[in-house]
Image: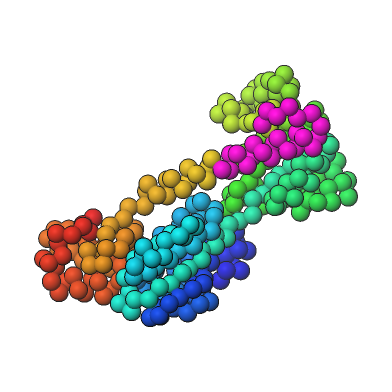
Amino acid sequence: MAADLARREEPFVLAVVVRRQPASSSQAGDMALITAAGAFHGWLGGSCTQPTVVREAKRALAEGEPRLVVLAPDPELERRPGITVFPMTCNSGGTVEIYLEPVLPTPRLVVFGVSPTARALVRLGKAMGYSVVAIDPAAEPGLFPEADQVITDLGRAPRLYAPAKGPRFAVVATLGDRDEEAIRDALAMSPDYLGVVASRRRFAQIRETLGAGGVTAAALDAIHSPAGLRIGAQRPEEIALSVLAEIVEQRQDETKAAADASDAVEASAVDPICGMTVTIAGARHTAEHAGQTWYFCCGGCRERFLAAPDSYIPQEGAA
């Protein structure tokens, strides 16, 4: 399943039990896969661990960083740097430590042009882990040895125009040779970032031509030109470095915004039996009582509540 998701460029999280203490039902090496939608496939122990793992997996995807979580009967004993600790609510007790590794689509860098700056962008982009595509009708064989794909005819590469599942960044470094045509092609790909390597005077001319040709002001305003952070870059390699630094800066800002939005949007409730935080969306164990909806980490907590609901109502847990 992981290979299939990776092939389709679908983000997911691999979760692995790296430590356990009795009487947890999990074993070191137990694994599960959690999709971006929160679907859980595999085994990490009792079902009471699942809501916490799914919630933390979504945060790992939003932040793009791995997480190490511990569920323990006495959370205070497990607190240490780099660990996020939650109460273990399974009846069996025990402690389980789970490593969450987000698997994200490889970011794609699309470079237009055959200029020295374009070639430097391809080299540095590949070194930084991007899937790099070089595009230009004049791209001769061997000109971009580091590129994953070299395209001389965009009409034969329809996939580049398909909606991207991973981040896609485009840089036009044609430097006076078919600038407007390359920018139109780049805009048609709906990239997350579009930078144009040009002087302010030259880009003003390009903008006027494109605007007269029907390109919207909003699309033109979104273009970064001169592309790159202002670091006094002069040589092609320095310009390439400044452009990729600007892309990294934008990615970091977007990742932080996505993580903040994930925390803000994901409403939760507290299980009135064990005190575990339960994500409301997609909750599997719920009960209606006294005109309110109550959420539970597992079926066992729900059954205990239904047996004597009035004894638990004073505690938090209502939606």
| Residue 285: x %, y % from top left | 28, 68
For image coordinates 60% across by 39% down, the residue present is 249
Residue 9 position, x and y percent, is: 60, 59
Part of the protein shown in magenta:
229-252
Magenta stretch mostly in which secondary structure?
helix
Q: Is 134 situated left or right of 159 in this image?
A: right
Against 196, residue 103 (above or below) is below
**Nearer-the-camera pick, 233 or 97:** 97
Choose top left, top right, bottom left or bottom right for residue 174.
top right
Residue lying at 60% horizontally and 63% vertically, measured from the top left:
6
Q: Residue at x 53, y 59 (%)?
A: 66
- Quadrant where the C terminus sits is bottom left
> Would residue 158 be visible to someone looking at this image?
no
Q: How is the image coloured?
A: rainbow
Question: Can residue 243 be found in the magenta stretch?
Answer: yes
Q: Which residue is drawn at the image coordinates 57% and 69% (left, top)?
A: 2
The correct choice, above or below, for 202 with respect to 41 in the image is: above
In this view of the protein, can residue 97 be seen by the observer?
Answer: yes
- What percent of the width, then of the height, locates residue 181? 73, 33
Q: In x, y percent, where is residue 172?
A: 73, 35
